[in-house]
Structure formats: C-alpha cells, structure tokens
Image (spheres, rainbow, N blue to C red):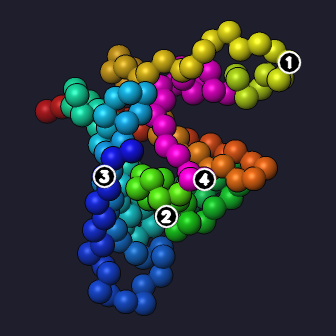
C-alpha cells in the first residue's frame, strides 16, 4: 500500500455527529499491480469516491447517500451504519486494519467473483485470478472486503468512468 493523507475541515467544530462529520482521505494503492489514487470524502450523509489509474489518468467516481450504503450493507448480511461504513473505507484506504482490504474490479471480474463464491469446494478452479481492470469497460467496482473470524463480506461500490474534458 501507499501513503494516505487525511484532512478534516470540520475538526474544530466539536460535538458534531458522525453523519454530519466532514473529512477527506487520499491514498495511493497498488491494485492488480497498477498504481491507483483513491480519494474518499464525507460531507453530511454523502460519501464520494474517486479512483484514478495513475499511469493512464483514467478515472472512475461516484457519490452515495447514507440510505443507499446502509441498504447495500444490509443486502450483504452484515449491516453497517453510514458512519461505520465510511470509517471502514477510510481505514482500508489507509491500510490501518488487517481485517479490511480494497480491490477494483470490472463487471466481468465481479461476475467471476460471484461465480466462484457459488461453487462448492470440491469443484476445481480453472480460471485463475481475475484479470486486471482495463479502460475498455466504462464501469468499475471498488470492493471493500471485511474479514472477521468466521465471515468474509464484500461491499461493492459501483463507480462510473469519468470522461476527460
């Protein structure tokens, strides 16, 4: 993993709830052997994520409201409140927790992950690892993975390709 930088413009406001907190995080990550710059920010009940492939300048981004994030965490079977989920993402970007990791996948990679999860352990894996993302597809999924003693939960965040002006 790389360096992470945090700023919190609301830090001196004191007494603010987690939902009203505001912060930004940037981290340099190596995913599939390629350097990415991940930017995360929270403003009120909205989480914004941008992921840029440093070598090409290709960039994917999205904003998520708290209700949407809480809904996707509910669907995974491991519900997280918005503030908790945002802090998990922040910690994963900073490399601050062994139980959290990040990955970036194409739609095809995500389907492969779902297929592998549905297979029984007796079935041999003939596919190998997922292919690294290419700029040919317009959508990426930032996957936050949380590993606990008896659980492994993947939280997918869909990101849309940002066309350069």
**Cα distance in 3D space between marks 4 and 3:** 19 Å
**Cα distance in 3D space between marks 4 and 2:** 13 Å
- Asked if the residue under mark 1 is in contact with the one under mark 3, i.e. CB atoms within 8 Å, the reply is no
Q: Residue at the spot x=60%, y=15% of the render?
A: 128
- Describe the element under mark 1 as helix, strand or loop: loop
Q: Residue at the spot x=62%, y=21% of the render?
A: 112
**Cα distance in 3D space between marks 3 and 2:** 17 Å
Mark 3 or mark 2, whichever is nearer to me: 3
Looking at the picture, how far across and down is residue 157, in whole percent? 50, 43
Residue 148 vs residue 112, the one in the foreground: 148
> Which residue position holds label 4?
99
Looking at the picture, how far across and down is residue 158, in whole percent? 48, 39
State yes or no: residue 110 in magenta: yes
Residue 32 vs residue 164, the one in the foreground: 32
The quadrant of the image that shows the C terminus is: top left
Looking at the picture, how far across and down is residue 121, in whole percent? 83, 23
Q: Residue at the spot x=30%, y=79% of the render?
A: 10
Mark sitting on residue 3: 3
Mark 4 or mark 2, whichever is nearer to me: 4
- Describe the element under mark 2 as helix, strand or loop: helix
* Residue occupying the far left of the picture: 165
> Which residue position holds label 2?
87
> Which residue position holds label 1?
122
């Amino acid at each position: 993993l790389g360096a992470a930088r945090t700023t919190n413009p609301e830090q001196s406001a004191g007494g603010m709830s987690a939902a009203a907190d505001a912060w930004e995080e940037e981290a340099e990550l190596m995913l599939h052997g390629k350097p990415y710059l991940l930017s995360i920010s929270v403003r009120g009940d909205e989480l914004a994520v941008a992921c840029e492939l440093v070598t090409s300048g290709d960039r994917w981004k999205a904003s998520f409201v708290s209700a949407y994030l809480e809904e996707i965490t509910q669907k995974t079977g491991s519900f997280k409140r918005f503030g908790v989920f945002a802090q998990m993402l922040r910690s994963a970007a900073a490399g601050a927790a062994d139980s959290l990791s990040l990955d970036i996948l194409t739609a095809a990679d995500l389907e492969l992950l779902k297929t592998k999860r549905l297979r029984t352990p007796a079935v041999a894996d003939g596919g190998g690892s997922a292919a690294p993302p290419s700029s040919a597809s317009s959508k990426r999924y930032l996957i936050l993975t949380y590993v606990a003693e008896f659980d492994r939960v993947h939280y997918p965040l869909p990101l849309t390709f940002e066309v350069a002006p």
